[in-house]
Image (tube, grey):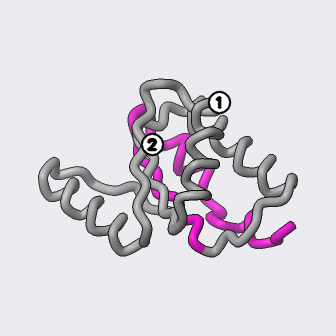
Amino acid sequence: MPKRRNNFSPNFKKNVSKAGKGFKVLTDFTLLDEIDSGVMDYIKKNMDFLNQHGVREILRVIPTDEQDLGFNILSAFHYSKEVVFLTLPTREEAYEYLRDEQSRQGDEPVRS
């Protein structure tokens, strides 16, 4: 079980709690080679946490269709039907999407 998963952002829960309802999250799974049961439990708990705090949109960086299918299945069980998902193959494309959307709406991103 990778030790890094516990340190992905030390301010994660605090920032989510401050964001209020309707926030967006960018997740990057490009370095995830395999998912053991410990990692799966960790991902599910964070999905539930985000859902409970009112996440509106999840941007996922997932380079393979197989991984995307797995996350689509998990998402059906751990997020409400109102949550919108967008899967992109690279982090650069996700950043570009966020920049374009921010310039259209004038949103200020929440940073950790």
Q: Determine whether 23 is above or below 83 in the image.
A: below
Q: Indicate the amino acid at tag 1.
A: Phe
Quarter containing the N terminus: bottom right
Label 2 crowd (10 A; few <14 / some 14-19 / many >=20): some
For label 1, the SS is helix
Residue at 71% over, 67% down: 7
Q: Indicate the amino acid at tag 2.
A: Ala
Q: Position of residue 33 (x, y in %)?
A: 71, 72
Residue at 44% over, 33% down: 83
Membership of 24 in magenta stretch:
yes
Q: Position of residue 110 (x, y in %)?
A: 40, 55
Residue at 67% over, 69% down: 32
Say which quarter of the image contains residue 97: bottom left
Residue at 63% over, 75% down: 31
Q: Nearer the viewer, residue 56 or 7?
A: 56
Say which quarter of the image contains residue 44: top right
Q: Nearer the viewer, mark 1 or mark 2?
A: 1
Q: Earlier in the sequence, mark 1 or mark 2?
A: 2
Residue bearing the label numbered 1:
77
Q: Nearer the viewer, residue 75 or 55?
A: 75
Residue bearing the label numbered 2:
19
Q: Determine whether 55 is above or below 90 in the image.
A: above
Q: Position of residue 22 (x, y in %)?
A: 39, 34
Q: Nearer the viewer, residue 4 or 65?
A: 65
For label 2, the SS is helix
Membership of 18 in magenta stretch:
yes
Q: Is residue 73 left or right of residue 84?
A: right
Q: Is residue 52 left or right of residue 40?
A: left
Hey, which residue is sitting farthest left in the picture?
A: 104
Magenta segment boundaries in residue numbering: 1-30
Give me the C-alpha separation between circle 1 and circle 2.
23 Å
